[in-house]
Amino acid sequence: MLVFENIEVVQGSFRLAADMHIKPDQTTAILGPSGGGKSTLLTAVAGFVEHSGDIRWDGQSLKGVAPAERPISMLFQEHNLFPHLSVSQNVGLGVRADLKLSPADKAKVEAALSRVGLAGKGAAMPRALSGGQRQRVALARALLRQKPIWLLDEPFAALGPGLRLEMLELVEDMRAEQAATLLLVTHAPEDAKQIAAEVVFVVAGQAHAPEQIAAFFDQPSEALRAYLGK
Amino acid sequence: MGARVEPVSRLTKPLGIAALIVVAVLVLAPVGALLLRAEAGGVSAAVWPAIRFTLLQASLSALISVALAVPLAKALARRAFFGRGLMISLLGAPFLLPSIVAVLGLLAIWGRSGGVSDILALVGLGPLDIYGLNGVLLAHVFFNLPLATRMLLQGWQAVPSEHFRLAAQLDLAPRARFALFDIPVLRGAAPSALLVIFMLCMSSFAVVLALGGGPKASTIELAIYQALRFEFDLASAAQLAMVQLVFGLAAAALAFHFGKAAQFGGGLGAPFQNWDKRKGPKLLDGAVLVLAALFVALPLLAILAKGLVGLAALPSGLWGAFVVSFGVAMASTLLALGLSLALAQLIETSKRGGAIELFALLLLATSPFVIGTGLFIIINPFASPFALALPITALINAALALPIMLRILRPALSRVQQDYGRLAAGLGLSGWARFRLLTFPQIRPELGFATGLAAALSMGDLGVITLFAPPDVETLPLLMYRLMGSYQMEAAAGVALVLVASSFGLFYLFDKGGRGAGV
């Protein structure tokens, strides 16, 4: 279980508060208007912003834990790959950060690439790939890192609707295989409906406790109705 | 978003602080030695003419360079023409050109027996005399007109193209355009251009050594040179160096006050679309561009032509001087590279990065001669400074290159941290692996460019080496100067060509090495 205990992030005049429990082994969508604090919530879990309160995973506090030591793989909207490294080198970073890979490690990289549908693309450079393929590479790396928490910050926002749904399905399948806990930031309600079990609504600097996806959309709150424009 | 900067490696801080200490010692120890040695009780009367001439030539050089740069930058900003890219590259050449070589080229065009004097003789005028103030100004404008032009051009190119479209739609009169675009651009870019050029000209030793002369055209640095080399008067040298330091710091303080310091290098984009179709301004811009191109290119061509002839008369000491110059350039470049990388990483990750950067840039204000004089005084009681000429020259050349390299590398490191810092931190990429897999491949173009500049500048430098070099030690620029001093102009021209080829060659190799792996 991922627990937010009286979290408060203050950045200038912006502040974000969260106090909630996220259930393990399922996808939780983080939904809300831009500027509301969705991404800030993820960066707090990843260890990139200072905050008061505490974030716990399985009872262990993450306070003072370096980003790389946290039980986390994170995917951003862009800059997930190093453009000067090949596809298999980018994935290989998920096995060993210094890229000193044994033949067995290399086989793992190749297998992960096959899993995301990029078999044989290992030697390509990122710039030779499409936007969707690049995010698949990052997913392959997340697969190898075998971290129990996946943080996805609108990684498919730049893709067309069909491709976006396809990627979401792939992510959900992979998540289920590893029994990972996935937090997906999105501003599209249909993304949430596609793969999420619960929704955290973040608006005006407040993260609301998770709600079942059906209940969330069937009995929309005032703020949600304003956001959805209905 | 106010992300916390992740420490890049456990070594970042110790290495950075070590570099900072080296820099501090390099600046403060010589200044301390000068303070102890300089005689109290005001500046001696004999120094005043040197101070007056230094300030006069530096002010005039700055004013003339910037005034001429205004029409040139404007013409470059608003005209698209064949060879525009070549012209902008040409404007980068004087920055890399060893000053003593430039003097030779300028003499070939503007000197008593140069091309312009020959033409003037046809109509019964001349010949020109470019020794003294005129010559110093001519050389300084040759070096700094291109620099000023590039700085102003960046100002004009920062104006959004929509503004020009709007002006075209409203059919604004030239006077209105001037008030709307030119005045704000000049107010932003001209003060820093003036101050940077003033600073560069205050400590431009080689030009004054070659073209100045006599008590009427002697700068503070030339006076230091005379005091140390010919009179061995350490007390006056120290006093003069203090005076130089004070003026340098004052100019630097003003430059920082007026914001952005010089931008060395960097790409300059396409001209903005010009909707003004009138003939008059177009002809005027064309004339400005042609004259400027001739002004910069003719001395370069003269160096090439005379140098090719001079290759037949190359002196015997050439190879030895080349090896010495090359060794000094490599040593100073490596040192500057190590120091600037360590410092740039520290600045990037430290909370007091701004203060550290400011301090390092102060090196720009302490001229090499100030540091050199201080080191001379420190070393003198223990060893002969003349025996240490080469290591000291390498050290001071490194100090000279450091601020330039820092200004190029720091934004590059910032960009890497901005774009990939979180990704690298999340993956646990740190220390040497981070440098090898992320930083180096990402900043490789800037690294190559900065290293090339440092190597070329050191290769062509004729500064502190003149303070220290015994007669049997020669670098290429020193060999050239000694040949010119004994009127062996043909041999000097041959050496000049070798020197230019080495400087530009080093820059080219490093810069190309940096671009080898396109990102």
Image (tube, rainbow, N blue to C red):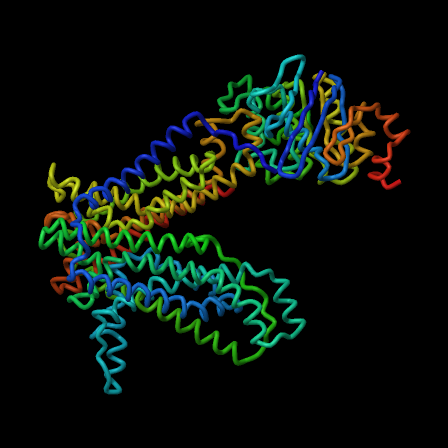
Question: How far from the left and from the top, in percent, is residue A71?
Answer: 62, 19
Task: Tell me: A193 left or right of B356.
Answer: right
Q: Nearer the viewer, residue B89 or B305?
A: B89
Residue at the image point whose x is 64% and y is 75% from the top: B171
Q: Is residue B401 above or below residue A83?
A: below
Occupied quadrant, residue B306 = bottom left
Occupied quadrant, residue B215 = bottom left
Occupied quadrant, residue B176 = bottom right
Looking at this rendering, what residue extends furthest in the right direction?
A: A218
**Residue B380 appears in view:** yes
Q: Is residue B154 above or below residue A134?
A: below
Question: How far from the left and from the top, in percent, is residue B404?
Answer: 37, 48
Q: Nearer the viewer, residue A134 or B181?
A: B181
Residue at the image point whose x is 23% and y is 52% from the top: B463
Looking at this rendering, what residue extends furthest in the top direction?
A: A59
User: How many tags in the picture?
Assistant: 0
In what quadrant of the picture does the N terminus of chain B appear? top right
Task: Tell me: B121 left or right of B409.
Answer: left
Question: How far from the left and from the top, in percent, is residue B2?
Answer: 59, 36
Looking at this rendering, what residue extends furthest in the bottom direction?
A: B123
Question: How far from the left and from the top, in percent, is residue B395?
Answer: 25, 42
Residue at the image point whose x is 49% and y is 43% from the top: B518
Looking at this rendering, what residue extends furthest in the front direction?
A: B41
**Residue B513 appears in view:** no
Q: Nearer the viewer, residue B299 or B63?
A: B63
Q: Is residue B235 above or below residue A108?
A: below
